[in-house]
Image (cartoon, helix red, strand yellow):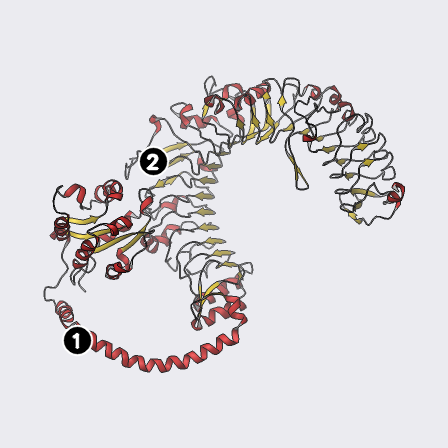
Amino acid sequence: MLETTHSEHIDCQQRADLQYNGTAVDCSHTGILRVPDKLPVNTTTLDLTFNNITILYNNDFLHLVNLRYLDVSFNPIRTVQSSSFNGLSLLLILEFNGHMLDYSEASMPDDVFKPLQSLTNLSMRSDVSRFPLRQFNLPDWVFGSLTNLRHLNIDTGSKTVFNSGFSDLTELRYLVIGDTAVHGTSFACGLGTITNETFKGLLKTQITYLQLNSCNLQIFHHNSLRYLTNLTDLIMQGTSLGKGSLQDVFQALSVYQDKKMSVVSITDFESYSNDVGTAASISVKTVYRICVSYIDLSSNSIIYIDFKGVPPLNCPLMKCVKSLNLRHNKISLGSLPKVWFLFLLLFSNLETIDVSLQRKYSVDEATRTWEEGGGHIHLPIPIPMIVPQKIKSINAAGSPKFGPLLDIYFLNGKEMQLLNLSYSGLSDFNHTIIGLDNLEILDFSHNDMSITSEKFFDTFPNLKQLRLSCVQFDINFISQHGKRLFSPLKNLENLDLSDNGLSFLPNDIFSTLVTLQVINLAFNTLITIPDLTSLSKLNFIDLSHNSFTTIENKYRLMLDKTAENNQKFHLSLWGNTFSCICESTGFLIWLQETSVELDGGNYSCMDVTGQMTYTKKVKTHWIAFQRYCVSGLWLNMAMGGASVVVVTLIIAFVFIKNKMKLKMILLRMIGQNMYPKKRNEFLYDAYVIYTDSIYSWVCNKLRTELETNRKIKLNLRDRDHLPGGSHADDILEAVRDSWKIVLILTEDFLKSDLAYFTMCNCLSAITLTTPQRLIIVIDHQLRIPANVDFLIEAVSQRNIITADIKTANTCFNYPRLADIILHEERTQ
């Protein structure tokens, strides 16, 4: 039966093998039980993966003398006979993963690999958890015959030792022991201890690369790497250590003192040491004499870096490192000298540094430049920020909470290309950053740019990417100064203004940015599109999740013109709820006929019945839609005549019911002393009405922002009203003495006894001469009951602010509230 299976015709796919100038044969997933014997002699690549082969017999590949690449992975192979690989003297790569070998002499004879004298790459990985009851050792003499092997990816047991049989692998460069993924299957690291003897048999090899990803180690001896004398790259991702800490790995690296290494990447390291302080700290003293180019210590929960005992002027580590990644740790700069900013100069070859996402970040008191609540700060000269001469990239996103920005001068910043300060708590951009003339990528996303100088970007003439997502831009500032703000960026290619609550952008805001290729305006409240006609290189504009109900004809023509100039032009409109009504007929036709590349072209919309549907569904029923619109036109004409009669009657009714009010308006128009009251006629600028649940925010943060920083005199009941008095009388008196009234509507306020009384008095304060006196701040979680509609409808939309009261301490639009309070009413 086996002979029949061996000789029968197998339906394998063949193609030209361009890499090895032969034939590539694919017999994977065919269910074969043995290696086929009727394959082309010029086969150079053979794929036998995912079959049912259990034994590799003697001379199975004897006729494939030109084979260069062989993959027998994911076969339940339990035995390899001694002459299985006869004839494969030219084989270069052998993939032998997902097997069932137990690495015993019976399953792998000593001479099995002897014919593979040209083999350079060998991968033998399997599920080593199959050997729970015995110590798993590698048959070192089996692998010793592979004298030209350069890459070895091999299984290990919990206490595997590379014995003397591996000493003949004098060409070996790459050793992979850790977690490995092959054909979508992951093979775990089986190694549990790394002792001083683990790599002893590899002394004569040329190993430069060692991968120990996801190894669950119990022991990592300090001298365990001494036999890997040529090691330049150490990769440990997701490795854990039961008895010890990251410092033990650093101690093991000390054997490479006065040598050069290319990469030390130890990430997501986990220590089970009981000594938390030791587990989260590392000392540079043990490794400072190693010259390393790339260091990655990200996501290791490092709290403290100890530089004690490190001579700063004679430290090869600092002089050699080109890339330093300390992302996602808990590092404190307190471990550095007091003049830590000068300390950076010692990293003379450093090109990239990433200290982003520090979950705990602090500096010494001597180096602090701001205090919470310090307000606007101006120094006579810019603060010098000294960086390494070759630095190109600094990523400090989400690290320290810097606070108000200062005038900064970057020394040695001419080579800088990237600066990421997103999520860093920056505010007050009415300052200048100089010294970064060649910066190409700048990210200030998720900072507070509500106060910004229109000249802020004048010092970044070579920017190509500018990311300003969720920076709380002041809408009035953008309307008046937006074009001036971005006009210096003549080389800008990518601009991100997403998630800024922008309801309007000046039509010419992008007119000078002729090199723009990508504009991101997603997650705003736009209903108009700025002029794009000058942007001949524009590839993509993102208008998703805005407030568009249609795209007007002038914007459609502009977008079509842009697509004519650039055939790659792409437009994103997803997340807008359009109107699929008769007035949108032109827009619906445009969606089907435009040459603009859309993100699907099928958008949610509201139909004529008020039901949610999709634009393509409306197009499917296009004839019925047009018939409805035509009949509606005649109906509208008939209704129009009736409306004229009704409007006339309403005007007459309004005149009769409001004769006195109309009279007062006419008197005021002819100058009969009907003018708004002035600010100086009141004791207070504003009376703030609030409940006890938000007392802390109102009397601290709100008071500081309005009264201390903006000189607005407030009337606060907990400060300006005598205790024990009548609450109702206090309200009446405060309303009378205050120029403006700020009513903070929360759930607790509406439940209070005097809520209705307070709202009625606030409403009575609105008169013909003071129509904008009442300002309402509404908690966005509040469901406004019907009996409060009378109050909301009496206040103009400009005087209504919606905010998250729970997070008001950190996120509230104080400039807008101050602007409304200080607004002087004019005579109508």
Q: Position of residue 333 (x, y in %)?
A: 41, 27
Q: Secondary structure at mark 2?
A: loop
Residue that label 2 marks: 382
- The answer to whether 490 appears left or right of 128 in the picture is left
Q: Quadrant of residue 121?
A: top right
Which residue is rendered at x = 45% and y = 50% of the image? 495
Apparent side of residue 557 relative to residue 721 in the rendered image (left or right): right
Q: Tell which of 256 and 191 is nearer to you.
A: 191
- Secondary structure beneath dot 1 equals helix
Residue drawn at point x = 57 percent, y = 32 percent: 238
**Can you say whether 607 is above or below 338 in the image?**
below
Q: How many neighbours does mark 1 have within 10 angstroms: few (below 14), some (14-19), or many (20 or more)?
A: few
- Among numbered discs 1 and 2, the one appearing first in the sequence: 2
Quadrant position of the N terminus in the picture: top right
Residue holding disc 1: 656
Q: Nearer the viewer, mark 1 or mark 2?
A: 1
Residue 424 appears in the figure: yes
Q: Residue 241 appears at what percent x and percent y?
A: 56, 25
Image side of residue 252 versus residue 824, left or right? right
Q: Please state the horizontal and vertical placement of residue 653, each as a whole percent of the image.
A: 20, 76
